[in-house]
Image (cartoon, grey):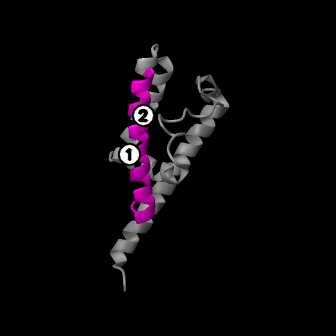
């Protein structure tokens, strides 16, 4: 299979432009570091905060889910993780035994549905 020479040239030009942008960004960051501008940021030197539900997402799905979410196409499982996190917070804040039991029941059903979906994804290799 031969590729179109113009396509190859376009790719080379695009790669060169990306390298130039990367270098410009690197120079700008280096200058901001030297001037002390970066150090004034409240988050300087601290780890980035974890997105909601990150720690509850199985490791093998984290990067794929993050990519899909950043592309504007989050999988429905992301919403399930968020729902689970909200239910867990509600459970901790619940003041009555009846309320806690109702939340536990909803949480259990949600976790079962989530486990089935993830297992289906693992088995089918669809992700």
Above or below residue 126? Residue 26 is above
Crowding at mark 2 (Cα within 10 Å: few <14, some 14-19, many 20+): some
Residue at image x 53%, y 46%? 24
Residue 94 rendering spot, x and y as whole percentages? 46, 17
Residue at image x 44%, y 30%? 104
Crowding at mark 1 (Cα within 10 Å: few <14, some 14-19, many 20+): some
Is 116 on the left-hand or right-hand side of 20? left
Above or below residue 71? Residue 102 is above
120 falls in the magenta region: yes
Residue at image x 41%, y 61%? 14
The span from disc 1 to disc 2 (Cα, nearest Å) is: 10 Å
> Does the rendering let one see residue 65?
yes
Residue tagged 2: 107
Residue tagged 1: 113
Q: Say whether disc 1 or disc 2 marks the residue closer to the N-terminus.
A: 2
Q: Residue furthest top?
A: 95
């Amino acid at each position: 299979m031969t590729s179109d020479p113009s396509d190859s040239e376009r790719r080379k030009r695009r790669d060169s432009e990306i390298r130039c942008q990367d270098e410009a960004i690197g120079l700008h960051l280096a200058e901001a570091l030297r001037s002390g501008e970066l150090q004034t940021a409240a988050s300087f030197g601290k780890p980035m905060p974890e997105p909601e539900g990150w720690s509850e997402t199985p490791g093998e799905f984290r990067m794929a889910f993050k990519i899909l979410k950043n592309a504007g196409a989050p999988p429905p499982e992301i919403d399930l993780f968020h729902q689970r996190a909200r239910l867990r917070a509600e459970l901790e804040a619940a003041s009555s035994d009846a309320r806690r039991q109702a939340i536990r029941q909803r949480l259990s059903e949600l976790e079962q549905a989530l486990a089935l979906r993830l297992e289906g994804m693992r088995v089918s290799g669809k992700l």
